[in-house]
Amino acid sequence: MKNTVRHIVALFMSVVLLLVGLPLPTYALESPPETNDVGSAYLCNLENNLILYEKNADTLLYPASGVKIMTGLLACRALAERTKESVTITEGMITGVTGRKMGLAKGEVLTVNDLLYAAICGGYNDAACAVACLASGSVAAFVQDMNRECERIGTAKTKFTNPTGLHDPAMITCVRDMALIAREAYGNSLFMVISSTRTYTVPETNVSAARLITNRNALISDSSRNYYNGYCRGMNAGMTDEGGWCVVTVSERDGASNLAIVMAARDAKQNELVPAYTYINRLLSWANRNYSYRTILQAGDTVDTRKVAMTGISKSEANVLVATDLKVYLPADADPMTDLTTVLQLRGGKLEAPLLAGDEVGEVFVTYNGQAVGKAKLTVDEDFARNGFLDGMQSFRSYLVSRAFIATAVCFTILLLLFLRMTRSRGGRYGIRTVRRRRYRRRFH
């Protein structure tokens, strides 16, 4: 029995030593999928803004239906409190609208909610023009609002001329700009709910029977499962002859939200799948296999020790801790020890008493290959009282350089100069003549 136990222990130790001696496994990152069927592509992690893949990201393109992401975003912002309101379609809302339409008619009464779903989920051009008029008063005013929003978020290469995406040689963008617009739209909950809905029914109106709207984005609504991706939410898809296919979506999987965009993709030939959809699914699968979240720092980890000022003690030092777990979305072949850089930013550039254990004192930032990929708040683990004498001295120093003190000193100096000038010029009670006269009187009297 004893020999059996010894053999088991010896075998266990042998396995441990063998494992310790083995080299750590290395991971080879797969190359991203390539295709000639897509003009531009972009894939990034929304939480950390880490760019996973890009192709011709700054090449100027026609935006096609990608325009409706901006249209939907601005309409949702402007009309979020009016979704239950009934509106009547006017001639100005639908005049001249071509392309994909749901058949809105002059005088038809619908709710704002119906029009938002028709424009964003269904991708109908007449509904897009209707919500543009409701949001800004007219299509022309809405287009101005679209371009002002572009300036605000920094899409320097984008110019919009209509809210539908119908081709106009003057309407251009690039996939990097489209990513900035999509990021803004992702932050609007109403837009994301509508663009993620598979089907929506517009109830019977005064001029039309009920209409079923199916999401224009086949990643969301495809019943044949050729394109459907259960991890995708929103955003938009469509094509024009000049701009090709534009597909934009967000994949939410295993805690990661990845924005994927394909633009200027060729149309499908007869009996073949649409390349834009198949390629975007390949990109997202590649990202899931090769990237994941990793915990770089755990809550309570000490990242540095810093001197604490204003305590009156020469060696007051505090442990600077991470307040929450810091998770970073990284490729499988990334080495956190060598590929990541951490930078501490303390409030005011230093630690200064008074401090209480748990107080937030700054943030730690993590970069990967020059890109900021994560941050977490920093705290201290003990209390530090402020020295009263030092506090008083600092207050006095602060007063000496304050505007109030400087203004007081200037006023005093001016008044003193005026007083001296007046006494010298008038020879008054304290002037030079008065002093001489008094000396003369003492001498002869």
Image (spheres, helix red, strand yellow):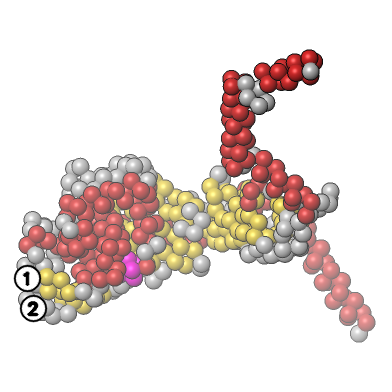
The answer to which of 440 and 67 lies nearer the viewer is 440
Local secondary structure at mark 1 = loop
Measured in 3D between alpha carbons, the distance from the residue under mark 2 to the one under mark 1, in whole angstroms, is 9 Å
Please provide percent x and percent y for residue 311: 79, 53
Please tell me whether the stretch drawn in magenta is mainly helix, strand or loop.
helix
Residue at (73% x, 20% y) in the render: 438
Q: Is residue 184 left or right of residue 127?
A: right
Residue at (62% x, 40% y) in the render: 405
- For residue 122, say whether it is visible: no
Q: Which stretch is magenta? A: 190-194
Find out whether the residues at labels 2 and 1 contact each other: C-beta distance under 8 Å. yes
From this viewpoint, which residue is outermost toward the bottom? 1
Amino acid at pointer 2 = Asn
Query: Which mark, residue 107?
Result: 1
Circle nearer the N terminus (2, 1): 1
From this viewpoint, which residue is outermost toward the right? 2
| Residue underneath mark 2 | 206
